[in-house]
Image (cartoon, grey):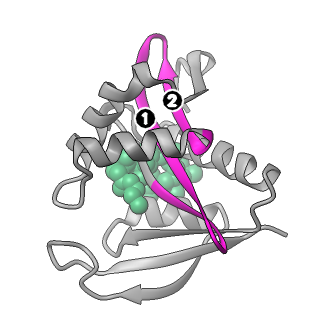
Amino acid sequence: MLPQSRELRLESYKPRFFRRLFAIESSVFTDDRYNLELFRHLCEDNRDLLLVARLGNRTIGYVMGEPHPRGAEVISLAVSPRYRNRGVGRRLMRRLLIRMERTGIVRVFLMVREGNAAAISLYRSLGFRRVRRVPEYYGDGEAAIRMRLEFD
Ligand SMILES: CC(C)(COP(=O)(O)OP(=O)(O)OC[C@H]1O[C@@H](n2cnc3c(N)ncnc32)[C@H](O)[C@@H]1OP(=O)(O)O)[C@@H](O)C(=O)NCCC(=O)NCCS
């Protein structure tokens, strides 16, 4: 847990957070990152399912979901490297899932790199299960694992 966990806040997206979110996204993801204009559209279109982690006045992570005909998709999750392993990613995901369930969404999907042990472990602990492997899904040739969570 964060030593300063009392100060961690999960806030709804506001346009003033955009630059920092894009900086986090660009630094964390490599060849599969979004370009600026697409990322801006995604933030605006999905603001009801976009949560921002703030510590004091710093923006340290975010999670974004997108509604989808059969449920919803978690389309991006990132925590700044220096704030990892302190429960921020888990809190973001849990809050997003609660918000999705409350809006009547019944199942949630995501794609994750096959080699991303940290994210796969987090998703499994939240109840996501593997659906299938998608070979060469990413630009560098790495496979993706498709995961799904069904709300009861
Ligand atoms: C994945 C990510 C968001 C996790 O954020 P975080 O704040 O560090 O995660 P938390 O501290 O909340 O940890 C939650 C769980 O993730 C898993 N986890 C986190 N880091 C891990 C690691 N290095 N190795 C294995 N599991 C790990 C554990 O299951 C952990 O639960 P535990 O603390 O009860 O063991 C973060 O590592 C990140 O931003 N990675 C780069 C971007 C990315 O991969 N996004 C997901 C794309 S699908």
Quadrant in the picture for residue 70:
bottom right
Q: Is residue 95 above or below residue 1?
A: below
| Contact between labelled residues 2 and 1, with CB atoms less than 8 Å apart | yes
Q: Amino acid at mark 2?
A: Ala
List x then y, in percent, for residue 144: 35, 77
In the image, the residue with mark 1 has its CB under 8 Å from the nearest atom of ligand 1: yes
Q: Quadrant of the C terminus?
A: bottom right
3D distance between C-alphas at marks 1 and 2: 5 Å
Magenta residues, dominant SS class = strand
Asked which secondary structure carries label 1, the reply is strand
Q: Quadrant of the N terminus?
A: top right
Quadrant in the picture for residue 124:
bottom right
Asked which secondary structure carries label 2, the reply is strand
What residue sits right under mark 1 in the picture?
61
List x then y, in percent, for residue 66: 55, 56
Sequence order check, earlier mark of 1 and 2: 2
What residue sits right under mark 2 in the picture?
53
Residue at x 75%, y 62% (from the top left corner): 105
Q: Is residue 92 above or below residue 147?
A: above
Q: How many marks?
A: 2
List x then y, in percent, for residue 93: 59, 49
Give yes or no for residue 74 being in the magenta stretch. yes
Front-most of residues 150 and 43 = 43
Q: Amino acid at mark 1?
A: Gly
Q: Is residue 15 above or below residue 77?
A: above
- Per the rendered image, the range of residues in magenta is 48-75
Asked whether residue 42 is in view, the answer is yes
Q: Is residue 133 above or below residue 126?
A: below
